[in-house]
């Protein structure tokens, strides 16, 4: 019984770590995409930014 509980706890911790790692990777990708978009926005000319194209 004790081994079963320890095994279950170990599996849950592995799942939690995996889930957190995936969330961190998604957050990193979103931040990277936002930074790239901001960089593109900054490279636009004055009139392109002014008129939103």
Image (cartoon, helix red, strand yellow):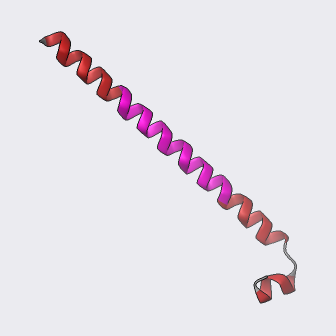
Is 7 displayed left or right of 14 in the figure?
left
Outermost residue toward the left? 1
> Residue 15, position in %: x, y?
37, 31
Is 43 displayed left or right of 3 in the figure?
right
Q: Main secondary structure of the magenta part?
A: helix
Could you tell me how many numbered marks the image carries? Answer: 0
Q: Quadrant of the C terminus?
A: bottom right
Is 23 displayed left or right of 39 in the figure?
left
Quadrant in the picture for residue 6: top left
Q: Is residue 18 above or below residue 31?
A: above
Q: Is residue 49 above or below residue 3?
A: below
> Residue 47, position in %: x, y?
86, 87
Residue at (83, 83) in percent of width and height: 48
Q: Quadrant of the N terminus?
A: top left
What span is colored magenta in the figure?
14-33
Q: Is residue 8 above or below residue 36?
A: above
Q: Is residue 45 magenta?
A: no
Residue at (25, 16) in percent of width and height: 7
Q: Is residue 17 magenta?
A: yes
Q: Is residue 53 above or below residue 14?
A: below
> Residue 46, position in %: x, y?
86, 83
């Amino acid at each position: 019984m004790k081994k079963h509980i320890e095994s279950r706890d170990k599996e849950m911790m592995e799942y939690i770590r995996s889930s957190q790692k995936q969330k961190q990777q998604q957050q990193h990708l979103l931040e990277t995409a936002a930074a790239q978009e901001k960089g593109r926005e900054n490279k636009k000319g004055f009139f392109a930014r002014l008129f939103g194209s």
